[in-house]
Amino acid sequence: MAGKSGKDKEDSFRDSLLGKDIPTLTLDNKWYKLLDEVGKKNVKPLEDKLNDLLKRQGKLTTETKEIKKIKKRLMEEIVSLVDEEAQGDDAVAAKIAENKRLVEECNEKLEGYEDEMVDIPREINEVNRQLMLITMEYCYETMQDNTDDIEELGEWLTRTRIELKKNLIRKQEKEAKNHLIYSYMHDIFGPDVVEIFDLRYNPEDHHPMTKEEIEKKQKESQNGQAAANAPKPQPGASVPNENINTESVIEDNPESERTVINGGDVII
């Protein structure tokens, strides 16, 4: 298998990713289709890490929305209780103080979440690029191996086609020889030739046809078709002799294995 060396290949892959918008691989169904069991095992650590980051990002987003809702409700309660606090209601003052404490907690959580929300996309992007590099490495090796196999299989198919053609010619030559023997013996012994020579097939159905034989068969078939399509004479009417086809009609046999031998060459 020819290809780039390890360092050159890695540098080439990294350069090719510059400025590219890489989709989040673990969210892309087409990415999973690239990997077989070996490939999935190789990417498993980064795949899990990326999925954990995505889950954390989703959780932070959801919790940030919930905390903001709680903060908004607490602030609305504080505003609604300000007038009652001015009247010296201790319970109201305690409620306002508790709400302010909870608002402060919300602010602290939101501040921490905001810092993390800034860092997580950067981490996701970095892990995703690392995962893409491993994927490119795996795909490179897979395509190189497949190309080697494709070339080897192509050579095998070429050899097989050549061998198949040779065997077809040998088979047809032997069928032609059997037919020659059969025809000669049939003229002497008639149908008994099948039993005398223990024939396991009818040589008439398995022998190459010459160009002349094919043309004769086609002509006879056409004559037979023309006779079949000719208008039938009315009862009592005379039939001209020239319209009567006295030649036998040979039907085409689609299951025949006969092959044309034209000028000594076998047409496959």
Image: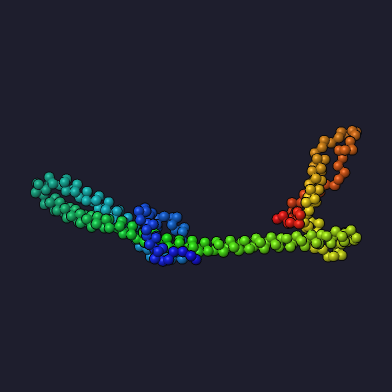
Answer with the quarter of the image where residue 127 lies: bottom left
Left or right relative to 166: residue 88: left
Answer with the quarter of the image where residue 137 lies: bottom left
Left or right relative to 71: residue 177: right
Residue 236 image point, x, y percent: 90, 33
Residue 153 image point, x, y percent: 58, 62
The number of numbered badges drawn on the structure is: 0
Q: In the image shown, does 154 or 81 lie closer to the viewer?
A: 154
Answer with the quarter of the image where residue 128 lies: bottom left
Left or right relative to 121: residue 33: right
Q: Which residue is drawn at 33% across and 57% down?
A: 125
Q: Can residue 160 be seen?
A: yes
Q: Residue at x 61, y 61 (%)?
A: 157
Residue 229 image point, x, y percent: 80, 39
Q: Which residue is drawn at 74% across and 56% down?
A: 265
Q: Can residue 51 be seen?
A: no
Residue 31 image point, x, y percent: 43, 57
